[in-house]
Amino acid sequence: MPYVNIKITADEDVTPAKKAALIQGVTNLLRDVLGKNPATTIVVIDEVQTDNWGIGGETVTARRKHGS
């Protein structure tokens, strides 16, 4: 039973339709590459606030303010 956790920043322009496409695409990839059963494949999307996501010692919020 595969479990996939996708983490994205919450302010991205990710619509419910795009999330559904991610879930379907990952499920299909696991089926096609590893032969996993789609009926038992779990995909979770976590949206993380940019203040809670750090890269290179600073938050994504700060990085975006100065264009990094």
Image (cartoon, rainbow, N blue to C red):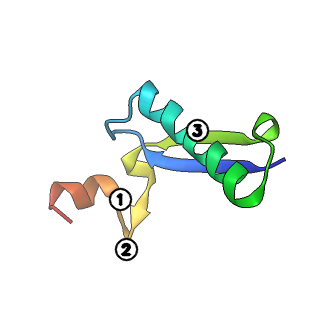
- Identify residue type, mark 2: Gly
10 Å neighbourhood of mark 3: few (<14), some, or many (≥20)?
Answer: some
Residue found 68% across the figure and 53% down from its top: 32
Give the labeled residue for mark 1. Answer: 59
**Residues tagged 2 and 1 counted as in contact (Cβ below 8 A):** no
Q: Nearer the viewer, mark 3 or mark 2?
A: 3
What's the distance in space between the residues labelled 1 and 3, CA to CA?
27 Å
Residue found 58% across the figure and 38% down from its top: 23
**Residues tagged 3 and 2 counted as in contact (Cβ below 8 A):** no
Relative horizontal placement of residue 31, taking residue 28 as reference (left or right): right
Indicate the position of residue 65 as horizontal and vertical percent values. 17, 55
10 Å neighbourhood of mark 2: few (<14), some, or many (≥20)?
Answer: few
Give the labeled residue for mark 3. Answer: 23
Question: Which is more toward the observer, 5 or 64?
Answer: 5
Give the labeled residue for mark 2. Answer: 56
Q: Quadrant of the C terminus?
A: bottom left
